[in-house]
Image (spheres, helix red, strand yellow):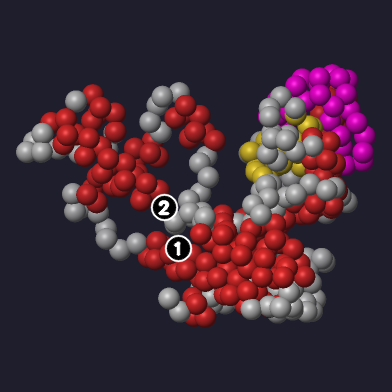
Amino acid sequence: MNTERDALPVRGIVGETETALSYVWRTPARRPRKQPFDPVAPSTGQGGLVRTDRARLERIVARVPEVMVKITGRTKGAQHLLSHLAYITRDGRLPAETEEGIVLTGREGLGDLQARWIDDVALDNRRRSDGTVSVNMILSMPPGTDPTKVRDAVRAFALDAFEGRHDFAFVQHDDEAHPHVHLTVRALGYDGRRLNPRKADLHHWRERFAEELRLRGVAAEATPRRARGRVRKAEHGAVRAIRERGVVPRVDRLAREAIVREARGEGASERPWETRTAERQVAIRGQYRATATELAQSSEPSDRALADRITAFLSNMPEPSLQRHALLGELADLAKAARIDRGAETPLIIDADPRSTEKNR
């Protein structure tokens, strides 16, 4: 493998300040605008690393916890907003804090917040009947993280992202092992523009939340899945809930039907997106490898130690595996088990529902 060639990005650099390694951590979607904290003229050290890149690389190879910032939904009307606020405050039993730092408690406090936001909804005569009233999200960290620091980091993040532009309120929940905070932001901004976050916004918010946690002494990172060798998207919560009830989700059934058609020679053989995914992973792993190679040649023990940690990180990276690959493996296992049960000479009837094979044994 040509390390130097493999280290090059699949796509072009998107900014004058981006280093070769920072390509690995950049979200596939472009950031909507330059942020005030972006570096202006980074100076590079051993391995072509700017100081911030090195610190981030240290955290990544140490596998520090990844933050989660997830949009859970949008409210679409006064009653929907009331229901959501009642849910996140447990009907007023949990305190809610606003952008002004006011802590609202009890049913009376919840009523004050509801009344203010509903009045604003009524006055917004330009809003469509099905228009978004609020954007709702969860910010969380793994079990064992200090809940107070998570809450403080959410407050700082929300003020940085929305103060002077949007009303918001947040509520901390402590009913699960992982500390998490519900944040709801009024969609209509003070300037009349609506909040409509894109993929790049979410990535930027993850980075800012992780930064606020680190400022409070909590090890946290916000890297794209691809930077950790993971190419499959996280499962949607609704799909997971359906599966936990013992029901095969429709998306699973459709995916299996496509795999069955492929096994029968009926499916399309060209999958350019899989080729692009594989090429991107080659570039990412090549860049890590090139950085480790250069650091290993340094006279500084700390550089050589980092090179060893990068190499270990690479060796433990999962092989790129898409859902199709997992389903093909599942189908092969089912076929093998069926042949053992039925006898090698008995033909196997492949079905898209794995439970049918189980029933026919």
Mark 2 to mark 1 CA distance (whole Å): 9 Å
Disc 1 marks which residue?
277
Find disc 2 in the rendering and name its residue: 322
Q: Are marks 2 and 1 in contact (CB under 8 Å)?
A: yes
**Which quarter of the figure is the N terminus placed in?**
bottom left
The answer to whether residue 352 is above or below residue 315 is: above
Query: Given the image, on which type of amino acid does mark 2 rest?
Result: Leu
In front of the other: 143 or 181 = 143
Label 1 Cα crowd, 10 Å radius (few <14 / some 14-19 / many 20+): some
How many marks on residues? Answer: 2
Q: Is residue 66 left or right of residue 269?
A: right
Quarter placement of the C terminus = top left
Q: Is residue 293 above or below residue 114?
A: below
Where are the magenta residues, as a range?
79-108
Q: Nearer the N terminus, badge 2 or badge 1?
A: 1
Find residue 261 and report its horizontal and vertical position in percent. Answer: 23, 48
The front one of 49 and 188 is 49
Three-letter amino acid code at disc 1? Thr
Residue 313 visible in the picture: yes
Residue 139 image label: none
